[in-house]
């Protein structure tokens, strides 16, 4: 059975959280809270109607949008039934990058599962597009920090 697991960190803004949306610099850092995305090919006991089953500690409406967007962007038209499990230590609503972690984790996991590619630049680009749907006009700092880790000066 085919299986991919991707783990990504949360993030904090050290300075410039709101200014970065207006083109000013911000300093962000990855934190020691993680989100993991597991994708498994399902070979038995799965409904033929549902090609993608999502089990998540995060809200699944945004996750469903992200999966559909990514399958379209990766040009995956036919695929076996899969189960996507998202397990997060990052609490939502505390500005710790939970939505960015979902976007980055799904982007990386689906890209590797279907294309056998690991391209952090493309993962970050895809995650940024997902973040736009969630937040309207994000800076890109959250998804960039979650993608590359460490301390990031972002503008």
Image (tube, rainbow, N blue to C red):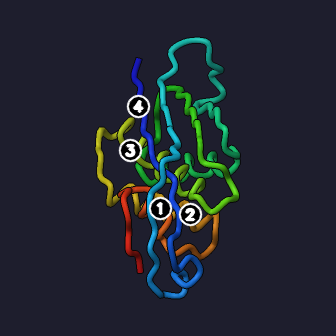
Contact? badges 2 and 4 (CB < 8 Å)? no
Percent across and percent down for residue 53 are: 62, 31
Q: 132 or 86: which is nearer to us?
A: 86
Q: Residue at x 66, y 52 (%)?
A: 62
Question: Dot 3, crowdedness within 10 Å: few (<14), some or many (≥20)?
Answer: many
Contact? badges 2 and 3 (CB < 8 Å)? no
Location of residue 73 (image quadrant): bottom left
Q: Residue at x 56, y 76 (%)?
A: 17
| Residue that label 2 marks | 131
Marked residue nearer the N-terminal end (4 or 3): 4
Is residue 74 shown above or below 141?
above
Q: CA distance from mark 2 to mark 4?
A: 23 Å
| Residue that label 4 marks | 4
| Residue that label 1 marks | 143
Question: Dot 4, crowdedness within 10 Å: few (<14), some or many (≥20)?
Answer: some
- Number of marks in the image? 4
Contact? badges 1 and 3 (CB < 8 Å)? no
Q: CA distance from mark 4 to mark 1?
A: 20 Å
Percent across and percent down for residue 23 are: 48, 87
Question: Dot 2, crowdedness within 10 Å: few (<14), some or many (≥20)?
Answer: many
Marked residue nearer the N-terminal end (2 or 3): 3
| Residue that label 3 marks | 111
Foreground mark, 4 or 1?
A: 1
Q: CA distance from mark 1 to mark 3?
A: 16 Å
- Helix, strand or loop at label 3? It is helix
Foreground mark, 1 or 2?
A: 1
């Amino acid at each position: 059975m085919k299986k991919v697991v991707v783990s990504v960190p949360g993030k904090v803004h050290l300075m410039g959280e709101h200014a970065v949306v207006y083109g000013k610099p911000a300093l962000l850092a990855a934190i020691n809270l993680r989100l993991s995305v597991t994708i498994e090919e399902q070979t038995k006991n799965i409904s033929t109607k549902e090609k993608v089953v999502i089990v998540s500690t995060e809200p699944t409406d945004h996750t469903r949008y992200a999966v559909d967007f990514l399958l379209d962007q990766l040009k995956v038209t036919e695929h076996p039934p899969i189960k996507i499990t998202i397990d997060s230590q990052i609490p939502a609503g505390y500005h710790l990058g939970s939505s960015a972690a979902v976007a980055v984790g799904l982007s990386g996991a689906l890209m590797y599962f279907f294309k056998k590619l690991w391209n952090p630049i493309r993962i970050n680009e895809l995650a940024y597009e997902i973040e736009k749907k969630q937040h309207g006009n994000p800076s890109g700092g959250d998804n960039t920090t979650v993608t590359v880790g460490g301390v990031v000066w972002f503008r």
